[in-house]
Structures are given as structure tokens and as C-alpha cells.
Image (cartoon, rainbow, N blue to C red):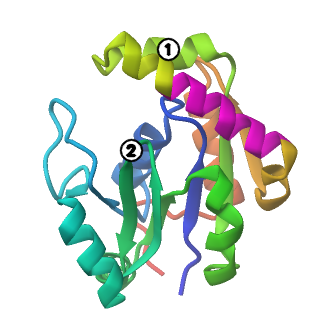
């Protein structure tokens, strides 16, 4: 079984964008989170995430069909085993976004994962990207506070768990992709095992 590819970093740094790009061009698929957070404008259930109620989430968690269940940003997040099994069955590498303070717990279950942390070049970069998502100022301020906490977590102990760290600027996406593809041995879409 191929190792999972873990992408971590603060909200707005580009984890989702990178995951979508890799899924389009390489033998990867984003492991969709199941969450209780509200859908953002333009999001679609079962495409961007599996959006469910708190009651449904807790029922799935109790039944043991989910892993990495955590509560942050005022919502539950987790992953369904059947979704990851389907990705492997299609011959692809799952890409999973993991909140930095939970990486040690994740690696207990998936010790062979490729781990990548995306560090923004500035909080202003994050603010601009959050504005592009049409988030209100109060939400942006809250998410920036959480971003600082996540970056502090990486700097203090989290860095020990990540094999690769990339500083994200407004114009270095292509070089990050090229390095990541090489370091994590990702295969092009038309390549087979």
C-alpha cells in the first residue's frame, strides 16, 4: 500500500489548492474530510467535503467507521475509512490535510506517511487568500489567530514530525509542486504501478 501524503499548514496557505492540483495531474486523490462545519459559497457536498450534522458525525465516530476525529474551528472533522480504501483501490495515493497539533496522533496510525508542512511567507498572504474566499473580517481575524497557533505548534514541536517544509509565497507554487512530486515519488496520472 502506498503511503498517505499529509499536507499541514494554517488556513489559507493553499493545502486544498495544492491537493486539488496534485489530484488532477498525479496518481493522488484528496481524502475528503467529513465535517460539521457549514459549507462555504460554491462548495458541494461529497465533492469538497462530506457535510453532516453534529449528531450524524458523533454517530459515525461511535460506530468506528472514522479516524482522526477532532474538534477545531468550532466544528468536527474526521475521515471515513471507506473513502480512503476507495482511493487505494483506484491505485492512487490519498492526500490528507491534518491539523498540525494532531500530527503525532496521526503518525501513530500511519507511520509511513509523507508529511509536508506549508508555511506562509506572511500572515498578510493568508489574509488576502481569506478575503478571496469572501470571509468576513471577524472570521478572518479568528482564523488568523488560529493560524498563528498552528504555526507556533509547528515551530515548537511539530517540525519534528514533518519530512518537508515549504515556505509559500504568491509565486512559488510550481517549484513546490516539482519538489514535492520528486520527494514523495508521486506518479503522473497516466503512469501505472
Residue, x 78% and y 57% (percent of image)? 163
Task: Give the alpha-carbon distance from disc 1 to disc 2, as whole Å.
Answer: 20 Å
Residue count near mark 1 (Cα–Cα under 10 Å), binned few <14, some 14–19, many ≥20: many
Q: Looking at the picture, tell me which residue is in the foreground, 40 or 132.
A: 40
Residue 178 percent coordinates (x, y): 62, 43
Residue, x 38% and y 70% (percent of image)? 79
Residue, x 86% and y 44% (percent of image)? 156
Numbered circle sitting on residue 74: 2
Read off the residue under disc 1. 127
Q: Which residues are magenta?
A: 143-155
Residue 193 percent coordinates (x, y): 48, 81
What count of labels does the image hold? 2
Is residue 144 one of those drawn in magenta? yes
Numbered circle sitting on residue 103: none
Main SS, magenta residues: helix
Judged from the image, the secondary structure of the residue bearing numbered disc 1 is helix
84 displayed left or right of 177: left
Residue, x 75% and y 50% (percent of image)? 164
Work out whether 14 lies above or below 79: above
Residue 46 percent coordinates (x, y): 17, 59
Residue 14 percent coordinates (x, y): 49, 34
Judged from the image, the secondary structure of the residue bearing numbered disc 2 is loop
Amino acid at each position: 500500500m502506498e503511503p498517505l501524503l499529509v499536507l499541514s499548514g494554517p488556513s489559507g496557505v493553499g493545502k486544498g489548492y495544492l491537493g486539488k492540483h496534485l489530484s488532477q495531474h498525479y496518481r493522488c486523490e484528496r481524502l475528503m474530510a467529513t465535517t460539521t462545519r457549514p459549507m462555504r459559497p460554491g462548495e458541494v457536498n461529497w465533492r469538497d467535503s462530506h457535510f453532516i450534522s453534529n449528531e450524524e458525525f458523533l454517530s459515525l465516530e461511535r460506530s468506528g467507521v472514522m479516524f482522526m476525529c477532532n474538534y477545531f474551528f468550532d466544528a468536527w472533522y474526521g475521515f471515513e475509512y471507506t473513502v480512503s480504501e476507495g482511493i487505494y483501490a483506484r491505485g492512487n495515493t490519498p492526500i490528507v490535510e491534518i491539523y498540525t497539533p494532531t500530527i503525532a496522533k496521526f503518525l501513530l496510525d500511519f507511520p509511513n506517511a509523507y508529511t509536508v508542512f506549508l508555511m506562509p511567507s506572511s500572515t498578510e498572504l493568508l489574509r488576502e487568500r481569506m478575503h478571496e474566499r469572501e470571509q468576513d473580517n471577524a472570521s478572518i481575524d479568528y482564523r488568523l489567530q488560529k493560524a498563528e497557533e498552528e504555526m507556533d505548534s509547528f515551530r515548537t514541536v511539530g517540525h519534528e514530525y514533518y519530512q518537508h517544509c515549504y515556505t509559500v509565497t504568491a509565486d512559488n507554487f510550481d517549484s513546490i509542486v516539482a519538489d514535492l512530486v520528486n520527494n514523495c515519488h508521486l506518479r503522473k496520472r497516466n503512469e501505472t504501478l
